[in-house]
């Protein structure tokens, strides 16, 4: 805390000021906050598990597998010796393409091996029948983190494209091309990706599920974009045969269809070679890893140095075999009592939401009935999945990092493809257990809290209710509120995209959401020598709605527990004050200007400062707890409230 700051003037600095002063962004990071601290701590625990798994003695099959994966990643000498050999097969396949008809088959092959290119293919619950999972094709194929980087004309975007060109050229050189050839190839890549970006819908628009809802037959989409030859793609990508699918952005396929004809075969091959090289950069030699870091780490994110190898290898293991490593992590760190206590808090916060909906003056009883139904149907997943994933078919060798990584990637792609035209698997998790995060899935109508987040500062057995409710309690309330934010409210209790609101209630909701969108659009996300950038209130609307709602619901639940009993202050703070301090302090963070700029374009979450100050400005309970007066910065004159 920085007690020299008035909590009613800048609560974020009051709660986090000293932490921020004492915890600058470490040179191997682009952002450093309480979430990152905790994840860093998890990395050490995971490393112990992985090192232990490599020692002599008895080990389970899972231990052996993750140990070998980690060991192969750490074995830099072998990786150097192999040079670009691990890329050879994929590049050869691309080089061998003789016709545009063959091009799509190589894309299918690349997708099967987890190399993204041209467009995206995955399973997805049917938007109108969430119990069935169907195939889904969507826009994709760009390398920079957002379409805007290719399209915007501001100085920063122009600079980014120049740096990107130089980076692509260097990577082609590392792959064996002469500087002249590589320079021309880089221009080709940028021009093709710019066309893909121009055909892509922007992130903010895509928040509305309506923009992504286009169920078609295979024949229909194939006819819309004949040059893609999607029929040949579906037949050769290793997915089960299907006849209908959802198309995320049909216009993308229509627009790129003409590019497939006008751009030469040689240029398309250059683009695919680039996608293969950049996707493999992290599993290749030091030269590739370093060049990849120079652009993506240093230039794009402001990271000064690379993370030590072991951290990158722990993360790579978590990404490739996360449920096997996660099982070992859970055995070591997470007992059944953690699950039980969290569930109790979830129930308390769900009942606060029930009460909150009941008290809304702007919502009709008809819509409330549907809202209750949705709330009561939410499934709570805590800690880790009921059933662990079986990786036994993945071949992991102790001396083949790139091969391991490709085989694990291909295993996951196959696992995903196998969901197509089957009943939706609602038990499958999107995050691995050590992850310090949580999520809500509209089509599943479930909230999920991996074991990684169920520890201090979010949650502690030794901490009192005020602190736990201000920490993990608000996170629970946040995820619940996602079921009712600008996106979530458009799905019903079963997870179907269906309007269950009366028109008047829908209008009332939109008015309140609009207030929040405008409010956050005024907040400055980054101010550096390249100018000032404000938040995109529409892109961050769902998260800001969830922050405000979560804070309110967790506070209601805490009040219910404390009741009229007088709880003694601790360290001079009332339970109410400690609740808000705990909330403020989970968001303490420092971030590089580069990372902050990237996030304004790509991250639906607001930066820590506004997750805290934005939410408390709208909270009468906060203002009461700290005795803030009208006119002070932490008292919004026009407080927005959705939930
Ligand atoms: Zn969220």
Image (tube, grey):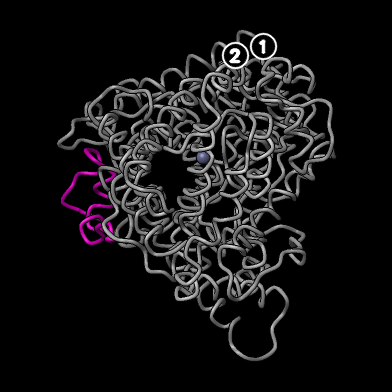
Which one is in front, 426 or 352? 426
Disc 2 secondary structure class: helix
Looking at the picture, does residue 272 appear above or below residue 208?
A: below
Q: Position of residue 436 (x, y in %)?
A: 51, 56
- Quarter of the view holding residue 598: top left
Q: Does residue 625 appear to the left or right of 461 in the view shown?
A: left
Examine the rendering and report whether any part of residue 590 can be seen. Answer: no
Closer to us: 82 or 344: 82
Q: CA distance from mark 1 to mark 2?
A: 6 Å
Q: Characterize the local packing of mark 1: few (<14), some (14-19) or many (20 or more) Cα atoms within 10 angstroms.
A: few
Q: Is residue 75 above or below residue 524?
A: below
Look at the image and give the residue range highlighted in magenta: 1-27
- Residue at figure coordinates x 84%, y 27% from the top left: 243
**Quick check: marks 1 and 2 in contact, CB under 8 Å?**
yes
Query: Is any part of residue 512 visible from this angle?
Result: yes
Taking the image as shown, residue 639 lies to the left or right of residue 385, namely left
Element assignment for label 1: loop
Between 80 and 241, the residue placed more toward the observer is 80
Residue 397: which quarter of the image? bottom right
Q: Position of residue 230 (x, y in %)?
A: 72, 27
Which residue does the image show at 60% across and 35% down from the upper left? 353
In the rendered image, which residue does mark 1 sit on?
A: 502
Horizontal and vertical percent for residue 8?
Answer: 24, 39
Query: Image point 51% across, 70% down: which residue?
Result: 73
State left or right for residue 642 relative to residue 302. right
Identify the residue under disc 2.
506
Q: Could you say which disc has been placed on residue 610 in the image?
A: none
Which residue appears at 65% of the width and 15% of the height? 364
- Please determine whether, in this image, residue 601 is positioned above or below residue 81: above
Whether the magenta-drawn stretch holds residue 527 is answered as no
On screen, residue 133 versus residue 227, left or right, reads right
Q: Position of residue 492 (x, y in %)?
A: 72, 26
């Amino acid at each position: 805390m920085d007690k020299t700051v008035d909590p009613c003037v800048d609560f974020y600095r009051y709660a986090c000021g000293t932490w921020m002063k004492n915890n600058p962004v470490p040179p191997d990071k682009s952002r450093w906050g309480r979430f990152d601290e905790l994840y860093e701590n998890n990395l050490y625990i995971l490393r112990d598990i992985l090192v232990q798994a490599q020692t002599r003695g008895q080990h389970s099959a899972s231990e052996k597998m993750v140990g070998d994966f980690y060991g192969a990643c750490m074995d830099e000498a072998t990786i150097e010796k192999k040079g670009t050999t691990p890329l050879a097969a994929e590049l050869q396949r691309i080089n061998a393409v003789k016709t545009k008809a063959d091009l799509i088959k190589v894309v299918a092959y690349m997708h099967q091996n987890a190399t993204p290119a041209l467009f995206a293919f995955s399973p997805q619950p049917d938007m109108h029948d969430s119990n069935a999972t169907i195939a889904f094709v969507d826009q994709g194929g760009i390398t920079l983190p957002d379409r805007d980087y290719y399209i915007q004309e501001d100085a920063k975007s122009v600079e980014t494209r120049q740096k990107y060109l130089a980076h692509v050229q260097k990577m082609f050189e590392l792959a064996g091309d002469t500087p002249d050839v590589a320079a021309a190839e880089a221009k080709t890549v940028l021009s093709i990706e710019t066309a893909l970006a121009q055909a892509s819908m922007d992130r903010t628009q895509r928040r509305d599920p309506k923009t992504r809802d286009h169920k078609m037959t295979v024949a229909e989409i194939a006819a819309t974009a004949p040059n893609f030859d999607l029929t040949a793609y579906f037949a050769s990508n290793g997915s089960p045969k299907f006849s209908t699918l959802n198309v995320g952005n049909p216009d993308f396929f229509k627009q790129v269809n003409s590019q497939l004809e006008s751009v030469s075969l040689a240029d398309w091959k250059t683009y695919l070679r680039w996608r293969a090289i950049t996707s493999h950069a992290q599993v290749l030699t030091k030269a590739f890893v370093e060049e990849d870091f120079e652009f993506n780490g240093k230039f794009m994110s402001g990271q000064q140095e690379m993370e030590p190898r072991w951290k990158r290898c722990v993360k790579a293991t978590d990404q490739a075999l996360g449920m096997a490593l996660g099982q070992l992590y859970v055995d070591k760190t997470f007992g059944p009592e953690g699950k039980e206590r969290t569930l109790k808090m979830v129930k308390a916060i769900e009942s606060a939401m029930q009460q909150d909906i009941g008290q809304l003056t702007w919502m009709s009883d008809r819509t409330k009935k549907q809202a209750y139904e949705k709330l009561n149907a939410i499934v709570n997943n805590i800690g880790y999945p009921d059933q662990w994933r079986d990786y036994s078919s993945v071949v992991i060798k102790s001396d083949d990092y790139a091969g391991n990584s490709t085989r694990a990637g291909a295993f996951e792609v196959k696992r995903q493809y196998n969901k197509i035209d089957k009943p939706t698997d609602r038990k499958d998790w999107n995050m691995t257990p050590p992850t310090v995060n949580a999520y809500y899935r509209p089509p599943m109508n479930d909230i999920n809290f991996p074991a990684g987040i169920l520890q201090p500062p979010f949650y502690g057995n030794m901490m009192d209710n005020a602190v736990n409710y201000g920490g993990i309690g608000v996170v629970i309330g946040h995820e619940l509120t996602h079921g009712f934010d600008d996106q979530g409210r458009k799905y019903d209790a079963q997870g179907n995209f269906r309007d269950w609101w009366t028109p008047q209630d829908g209008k009332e909701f939109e008015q309140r959401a609009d207030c929040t969108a405008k409010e956050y659009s005024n907040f400055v996300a980054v101010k550096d020598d390249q100018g000032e950038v404000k938040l995109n209130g529409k892109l961050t609307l769902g998260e800001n709605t969830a922050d405000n709602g979560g804070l309110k619901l967790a506070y209601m639940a805490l009040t219910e527990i404390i009741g009229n009993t007088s709880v003694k202050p601790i360290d001079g703070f009332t339970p109410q004050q400690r609740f808000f301090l705990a909330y403020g302090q989970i968001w303490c963070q420092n971030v590089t200007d580069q990372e902050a700029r990237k996030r304004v374009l790509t991250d639906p979450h607001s930066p820590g400062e506004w997750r805290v100050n934005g939410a408390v400005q709208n909270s009468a309970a906060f203002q009461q707890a700290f005795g803030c007066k009208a006119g002070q910065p932490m008292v919004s004159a026009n407080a927005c409230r959705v939930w």
